Amino acid sequence: MPKYLMLKHYRGAPKGTHDVPMDKWTRDEFDAHVKYMSDFADRLEAAGQLVDEHALAQTGMWVRYDGEGKPPVTDGPFAETKDLIAGWMIIDVESEERAIELAGELSAAPGKDGKPIGEWLELRPLMTAETAPTFE
């Protein structure tokens, strides 16, 4: 069965949908969101479709190799993933259609005032021998 990565983004809701930042929610709204996520993960685990999942803290840094004996470069000229990526799930499902269905369900997690966020989720298949590039 194919495995997919579902990336949740802090700024994932389209404008005009329900794009209230999490720091503007109440504690109860945050707890309801986390419960939805937890219940969703529990259902996937019970169905044998959850590989792993984690929420990410908003802190972090960029690190890269910059040559032998040189210190790593941190905080480059790129968008900060700590501002973008809120968490991830890896799912193991029978088809791309099922992965899309689950991503749509996860997109409905409640936010401010209990309304579904309607956030965009990044859905990417994990690379396997079958999906790896071929080289000549």
Image: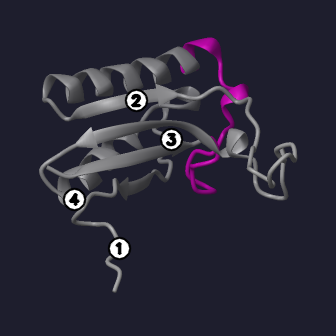
Position above or below: 80 against 124: above
Indicate the amino acid at tag 1.
Pro
Q: Which of marks 3 and 2 is nearer the N terminus?
A: 2
Q: Do the residues labelled 3 and 4 touch (CB within 8 Å)?
A: no
Query: Marks 3 and 4, how far apart in space?
Result: 23 Å
Instruction: Sort mark 3 into few (<14), some (14-19) or many (20+) by Cα contacts within 10 Å.
Output: many
Q: Earlier in the sequence, mark 2 or mark 1?
A: 2
What residue span does the magenta drawing correspond to? 10-29
Q: Which colour scheme is used?
A: one colour
Instruction: Sort mark 4 into few (<14), some (14-19) or many (20+) by Cα contacts within 10 Å.
Output: some
Q: Is mark 1 on a helix, strand or loop?
A: loop
Residue displayed at 87% across by 47% down: 70
Quadrant in the rendering for residue 49: top left
Q: Mark 4 points at which residue?
A: 96
Left or right: residue 111 versus residue 63 is left
Q: Which mark is residue 53?
A: 2
Q: What percent of the width, then of the height, locates residue 61? A: 76, 38
Indicate the amino acid at tag 3.
Ile
Query: Marks 1 and 4, how far apart in space?
Result: 19 Å
Instruction: Out of 96 and 65, give the one closest to the viewer.
Output: 65
Left or right: residue 132 versus residue 63 is left
Q: Do the residues labelled 1 and 4 touch (CB within 8 Å)?
A: no
Q: Is residue 16 covered in magenta?
A: yes
Indicate the amino acid at tag 4.
Glu
Quadrant where the C terminus sits is bottom left
Q: Name the residue under label 1.
A: 133
Residue displayed at 84% across by 47% down: 73
Q: Earlier in the sequence, mark 2 or mark 4?
A: 2
Q: Mark 3 points at which residue?
A: 117
Q: What element carries label 2?
A: strand
